[in-house]
Image: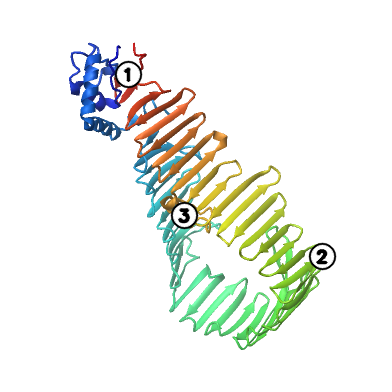
Amino acid sequence: MGNGRAIAVPGEAAGRLACGGIGCTTGCSPRASCGTPPGGEVATCHPARASQALAALRAHPSIAVLGAVLAVVSSGEGLASTHLPTAGGWRAFGPLFSDVSLTLDPGQGTEAAGPLWAEGESDGVRSWRLAPLVSREQDPVADRDEWDVLFPLSTYDRFGSEWQVQVLQMLRWSGGATVDGDVKRRQTLFPLYFRQRSQSGTNDYLAVIPFYGSVRNRLFRDEVKFVLPPLWVESRKRGAVTKNILFPVFHVRSGGGVQGWQAWPLVGSETKEPTVRTNSLDEAEVVPGHALKFAAWPFLLSERSGIGGANPTTNLFAFPWHLRTRSPQMDHTWWMGFSHRTNRAAGYEEWAYPWPFLGHARGPGRHANRVFPFWGKATNATQQSDFVLWPLYTHRRLQSGTLDRERFRVLFMGFSSTREEDTTTGRALRRRALWPLFTWREQPDGRSRLQVLAPVEPAMPGNKSIERLYSPLWSVWRSESDPARRKATRSLLWNVWRWERAGDETRASAVFGLVQTRRDAGGRSWRVLGWPMGRGGVKPSAIAVGPGRADVVHSTGH
């Protein structure tokens, strides 16, 4: 085509601008038009006309910018054209809008308005968020639905027929089927109002504190009744009934083998005889009894526990001066911080002088030395713990069965490194966090994720509500990888710069998608301001106009 050069401009709008907009009409091939050719046919411009178009664009660069902007803000197909093909398409406009495939799970995702909006679907699980206000996750297969509104201010959770709504952990509604086939609905304004209605009518209750009412299977009791509490309160647990006057000062307790009374904190006494019950395996088992007395609580207490069991134990407390424990398995004496323990069941002796500053333990069941807070180390058959300048450095390890769990910490949450390994497979879950700079985790299958910054995640690792609603707001850098599927992504400042790898193909987008590149076995291609810049260093020399796309026709210059 001689020395004349034409311009490669993306999309229908740029085709009209470079051809019809500058007068390349009579010079065009008869099979082309200056609009959108039917069927995406190629419009080849006369070299002289193309040179005029190039000169005009150089004289008026605003026209070129306008053409690029028109291409970028159009349908977006130009950014997913044949120059940057991907499975499912790839539209990347930085923080404004990014529509990409997920990395750690199969599926598609969309992010828009920086960290504020996102939606996606993976293996049938659909989720979306408007951070930091609301998020939702649905799993139709498991029949599960979760909502978070300004978590933990309000949440909604449903699993099958069971559901729950809470506001500030004080106002709560819940309902669903129970194991006995009944259907219940509850309303709670803790600690003032409790109400339950059941389909059978046998599990109904109403309680309005501080006036009158009753509740069932709440407040760690089988049933609680009251009138003008704390004036009169009656509770039942495992057959024992406790009647309180001026709760918790005066009470009497009876039933289920228990007899007792108290005038707290002055004096009190309670006994329980050993009883027999049937366990979940339909076997009879002994429930040990106990005997308790106190005076001037908590200073003087005497207790016998495990009566009728395999390890009856006697405890005597004279707080804070003296403590004594005697049982077939262990003896322990504590006097003003100095203590001696003989644990016959575990097989060791331990001394503290005084606790917790100096101590050591010896025996096959435990070996320990402690000079708190400077240094300490303790080991037994399954566990190891040590510290240096506590809490500057602490280390714990648990080896039990097929589990090998190890954790290092510096200044509690300052730095934390955790490894949980399955010794039969050698695969491990790993987590590391440096508050508030980053958090990193790697799943046993090799999938990993790095996030910078992380002011909350080290204290609440694995909290899905935090990760959905708040983590995106401060995640200035994200890096995700799935070696099994050969996928990886990196994102800076909510996709101002984004890099992806899928198999042998890599793609990158920067500055709101105005600069994009793709590299595969065929070489590297670029788009700047939506304009194709060629592949492998070959410059475009003609315009190919198609419906919503631009293909570059390369020439040798002859």
Residue at image mark 1: 541
Residue at image mark 2: 363
Of 449 and 122, which appears nearest the observer? 449
Disc 1/disc 3 C-alpha distance (Å): 52 Å
- The reply to whether residue 158 is visible in this rendering is no
Residue at image mark 3: 466
Amino acid carrying mark 2 in the image: Gly
Can you say whether 415 is above or below 224 in the image?
Answer: above
- The reply to whether residue 360 is visible in this rendering is yes
In which image quadrant can residue 379 be found?
bottom right
The tag earlier along the polypeptide, 1 or 3, is 3
Q: Secondary structure at mark 3?
A: helix
Amino acid carrying mark 1 in the image: Ser
* Left or right: 358 in relation to 230: right
* Left or right: 171 in relation to 250: left
Image spot of residue 498 (x, y percent) = 43, 39
Disc 1/disc 2 C-alpha distance (Å): 85 Å
Amino acid carrying mark 3 in the image: Ile
Image spot of residue 167 (x, y percent) = 41, 63
Of 370 and 79, which appears nearest the observer? 370
Q: Secondary structure at mark 1?
A: loop
Question: Depth-wise, is mark 1 or mark 2 nearer the camera?
Answer: 1
Image spot of residue 411 (x, y percent) = 58, 62
The tag earlier along the polypeptide, 1 or 2, is 2
In which image quadrant can residue 325 be found?
bottom right
Disc 2/disc 3 C-alpha distance (Å): 45 Å
Residue at (32, 33) in percent of width and height: 529
Can you say whether 382 is above or below 247 in the image?
Answer: above
Which disc number belongs to residue 481? Answer: none
Question: Depth-wise, is mark 1 or mark 3 nearer the camera?
Answer: 1
> How would you rate the neighbour count of disc 3 (Cα within 10 Å): few for under 14, some for 14-19, many for 20 or more?
some
